[in-house]
Image (tube, helix red, strand yellow):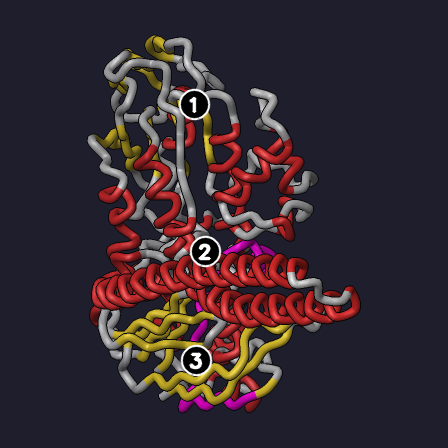
């Protein structure tokens, strides 16, 4: 059982991240923790795992949780055994078996005589049986690092498991192992993820926002249905407030016009009847005061409605606030852009692919590159981009503009500010206000324009790059994405999906996110 009561967290720089978080997770529950990038999901997991202390509030867990963090290279200096926190126990077992039966070693081992066997079994399940526990984490791929920590679940057998984006970096077969584990485990799970297939395996969705946590009793599809109902009601409320605002402004105009006519008519009558100047001034002041009071009353009413409307609009999802507008590629649909004839690349004298590759890419196609880690997907992308040449076979490449977007959006310059970065793509001499208008369309307000790109989250980097592509005078003919949904929250995945579906050129995607591939209407796969 997990209970959070009135949890608040303030960053060391004194910025409040969240406050008054309340959540109860029952034994054997499988709970998704979702929310926009930057709202504090990973921080909350760290608080539950006792890696961070909350600024205030109370955390109750029946047993020590097992925490699988997002992998960013922070464990590279550790061995696999150290990362799994089993090094002392393994050393104690080794010492005892070699004859050093000290009390200290027995205490460290704690009668866990099968620790070595359990490690081997766990690594074998996660397809890591060729790894040695003494290997450094820095020698492993991102997917292997994630699977090392996942193997720790079988080793430690915790009652509560915390997973932070566990499907990141995993290939298709490894993701399936993760899905199987989630379905069969008896442990209580709390999972932060954008992987919608994974989220549909969980029985509760907890949405973290600035307003706190809202719990939905069902999987992700159920949550989406409920959100659609809520959004429909929200849209209705917005339309009602917009109508009320129009009516209030119209009423204000009519009332002020009527008052001005009455004041003017009264003044004319007074002048004709010869009212003394001092009296005229008094009457004029009274009329002005009356008009001022009317303006104040209406301004207060309009201000109240406008404030309500602003609050309602701020509750809209980012996808509903954004507007896309990719220019169509100048290449007509179906034109051949790239042809590979029996191509291959050799590493250390050995061909990368068992069979030479033969394929064609035409304008407007949507293609997924599939294959396990190390199958040569990155090399194939470089071939398509013209960065490397095949050592076997021939290629044809039409004159076209191609853009490669990696999972870190590294084509952005971290040393530039948001507005400066946008200017780098301004090849059609757009005016300053036009660029800022486009930035606003992609949710970069005045407060964001002077932010350095290095300070942007994954979702913000993605939105900025999409905006930059729109600022460019001509859309690329081909856009290649490498695991584009990694490090994005669900909202930003939806933004990316909408943008891709507006784009009419050729899309080539490396992704293990099957839901994402379905939603961008992938037409065929190139399997490596």
Where in the figure is residue 232, as x and y percent of width and height? 27, 62
Image: 184 above or below 107: above
Q: Earlier in the sequence, mark 1 or mark 3?
A: 3
* Neighbourhood count class around disc 3 (C-alpha, 10 Å): few under 14, some 14–19, many 20 upward: many
The answer, for residue 201, to whether it is visible in the render is no
Where in the figure is residue 293, as x and y percent of width and height? 61, 72
Q: Which residue is mark 3?
A: 65
Q: Which residue is at the front of the view, 119 or 371?
A: 371
The disc label shown at residue 11, or none: none
The answer, for residue 168, to whether it is visible in the render is yes
Mark pair 1, 2: CA separation = 35 Å
Where in the figure is residue 92, as x and y percent of width and height? 52, 78
Query: Residue sitting at 38 percent across and 50 percent down?
Result: 319
Q: Earlier in the sequence, mark 2 or mark 3?
A: 3
Question: Mark 2 against mark 3, which lies toward the viewer?
Answer: 3
- Tags 1 and 3 touching, CB below 8 Å: no
Q: Which of the 4 image quarters holds residue 357? A: top left
Q: Which residue is mark 2?
A: 145
Q: Is residue 71 magenta?
A: yes
Query: Residue sitting at 61 percent across and 22 percent down?
Result: 429
């Amino acid at each position: 059982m997990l209970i959070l009561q009135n949890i608040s967290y303030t960053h060391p720089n004194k910025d409040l991240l969240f406050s008054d978080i309340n959540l109860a997770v029952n034994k054997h529950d499988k709970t998704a923790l979702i929310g926009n990038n930057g709202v504090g999901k990973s921080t909350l997991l760290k608080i539950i795992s006792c890696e961070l202390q909350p600024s205030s509030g109370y955390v109750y867990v029946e047993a020590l949780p097992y925490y699988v963090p997002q992998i960013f290279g922070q464990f590279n200096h550790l061995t696999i055994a150290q990362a799994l926190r089993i090094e002392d126990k393994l050393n104690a077992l080794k010492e005892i078996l070699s004859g050093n039966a000290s009390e200290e070693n027995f205490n460290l081992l704690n009668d866990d005589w099968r620790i070595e066997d359990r490690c081997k079994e766990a690594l074998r399940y996660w397809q890591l049986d060729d790894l040695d526990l003494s290997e450094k984490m820095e020698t492993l791929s991102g997917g292997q690092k994630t699977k090392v920590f996942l193997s720790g679940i079988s080793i430690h057998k915790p009652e509560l498991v915390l997973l932070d984006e566990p499907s990141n970096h995993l290939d298709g077969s490894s993701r399936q192992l993760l899905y199987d584990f989630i379905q069969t485990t008896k442990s209580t799970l709390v999972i932060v993820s954008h992987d919608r297939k994974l989220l549909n395996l969980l029985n509760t969705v907890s949405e973290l926002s600035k307003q706190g946590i809202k719990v939905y009793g069902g999987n992700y599809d159920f949550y989406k249905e409920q959100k659609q109902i809520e959004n429909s009601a929200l849209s209705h409320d917005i339309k009602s407030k917009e109508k009320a605002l129009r009516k209030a402004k119209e009423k204000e105009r009519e009332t002020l016009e009527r008052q001005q006519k009455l004041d003017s008519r009264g003044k004319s009558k007074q002048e004709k009847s010869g009212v003394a100047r001092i009296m005229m001034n008094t009457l004029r002041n009274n009329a002005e005061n009356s008009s001022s009071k009317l303006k104040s009353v209406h301004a207060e009413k309009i201000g109240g409605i406008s404030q309500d409307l602003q609050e309602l609009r701020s509750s809209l999802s980012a996808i509903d606030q954004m507007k896309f507008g990719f220019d169509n590629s100048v290449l007509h649909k179906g034109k051949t852009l790239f042809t590979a004839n029996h191509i291959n690349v050799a590493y250390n004298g050995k061909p990368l692919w068992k069979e030479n590759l033969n394929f064609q890419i035409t304008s407007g196609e949507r293609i997924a590159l599939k294959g396990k880690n190390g199958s040569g997907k990155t090399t194939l992308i470089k071939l398509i981009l013209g960065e490397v040449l095949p050592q076997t076979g021939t290629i044809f490449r039409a004159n076209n503009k191609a853009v490669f977007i990696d999972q870190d959006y590294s084509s952005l310059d971290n040393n530039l500010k948001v507005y400066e970065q946008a200017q780098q793509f301004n090849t059609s001499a757009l005016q300053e206000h036009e660029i800022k208008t486009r930035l606003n369309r992609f949710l970069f307000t005045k407060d964001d324009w002077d932010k350095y790109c290095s300070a942007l989250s994954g979702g913000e980097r993605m939105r900025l790059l999409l905006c930059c592509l729109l600022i460019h005078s001509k859309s690329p003919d081909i856009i290649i994405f490498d695991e584009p949904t990694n490090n994005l929250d669900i909202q930003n995945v939806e933004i990316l999906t909408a943008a891709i579906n507006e784009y009419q050129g050729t899309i080539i995607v490396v992704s293990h996110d099957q839901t994402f591939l379905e939603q961008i209407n992938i037409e065929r796969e190139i399997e490596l």
